[in-house]
Image: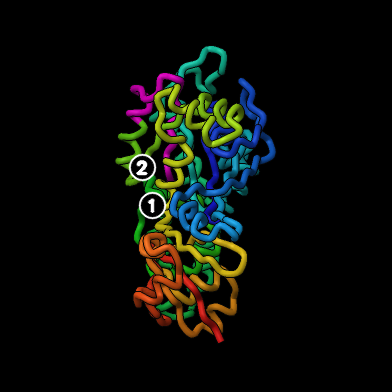
Amino acid sequence: MGFNCGLIGLPNVGKSTIFNALSAAGARVESYPFCTIEANMGTIPVPDSRLDRLAALFSDKQKIPTYLEFIDIAGLVEGASEGAGMGNQFLSEIRTVDAILHVVRCFVDPNIAHITDKIDPLRDIDIVNTELLLKDYETLGRVEERLAREAKGKGHHAAARLSAWQHLRGQVAKGTPLRDIPIAPEIEDSLGEISPLSVKPLLYVANVGEKGENEYSQLVTLIAKEHNTKAITIRGLIEAEIAEAASTAEEKAAYLQEWGLNKTGLEELIKSGYQLLDLITFFTFEGPEVRAWTVPQGTTAPKAGAKIHSDFEKRFILAEVMSLEQLISMGSEKALREKGQVHRAGHDYIVQDGDVIHFISA
């Protein structure tokens, strides 16, 4: 699995349409709020031309991509942190995702009701972000009560933890998401245990009409910059229709060209998502498979090997690292070895994006 993303936003912003555009899963789409009750889930292969080229070199092996999971979560409304709308269900489902894709309505359609009757990306974004912060403030408060009890008569360390936690909660009360607050080392573990919402990496998705970029999506881009993140623009309805109609890559390319698009929203989303989560991809061609794997930037060779099998970490001896470009250029692993272009790496080797690796264990 590459990573999983939760699509959030107000009702009727087009989350399910975007979900269908990205996953071709055919989730139910209606023109009224809360048509999504149970979360829709879709798992899709991550397109990677490097894997395609590597697989062409080993035509007798099965090509296995890494995967991306999307979760289309019920719409959030003002008061969700106190249970309004589908609030409680929404907030529990979002805790499980690696990253948040905040879908913002940037299209005008009189046939699809807007929950507040007027398109206003700034207000819509503020509603959702405020509800996430309110829920985090409440959750942090419960932990603060426990830390206060622990701090009584237990020395400087417990008092320091309480003080750091109170400072953290105070920042959230001022409207600062946890992802933007430096976390004191003494409370990192406690914060991780409660899986707060505003600590998750965030990417804005401006859902526009068939004409593409507009004043609303441009505003979303500006807001994203203010929030130290990125925004991508997707013509949700058009891409959902293409995903449903196109049965081959060639057909999809033709449809995209017809609409003046050179790539899908999925491709842009994957690129932005990997950057957001600081992820990289490495490749293997062990046994009957040519395969892509996703790991965080900075992963050591043994930890990367554990993605394949725990023995590659527990009994790690070395990793043989090859350049994908050199491997393809020379045409075979044998030719690469004869040229002395296979690098033998130890426990401390940091895996690089695009590495082709053969793990050796005891």
The residue lying at 62 percent from left, 40 percent from top is 83
Q: Which residue is mark 2?
A: 230
Mark 2, Cα crowd under 10 Å, few <14 / some 14-19 / many 20+, is many
The residue lying at 55 percent from left, 73 percent from top is 306
Q: Are marks 2 and 1 in contact (CB under 8 Å)?
A: yes
Going from N to C along the chain, the mark reached first, 2 or 1, is 2
Q: Which residue is mark 1?
A: 275
Q: Position of residue 317 (x, y in %)?
A: 49, 85
Which residue ends up furthest to the right in the rendered image? 38
Residue 244 located within the stretch drawn in magenta: no
Considering only vertical position in the picture, is 75 above or below 269?
above
Considering only vertical position in the picture, is 193 above or below 240?
below
- Asked if residue 354 can be seen in this view, the reply is no
Q: Element type at marker 1?
A: helix
Viewport quadrant of the C terminus: bottom right
Which span is picked out in magenta? 202-219
Q: Position of residue 106 (x, y in %)?
A: 43, 25
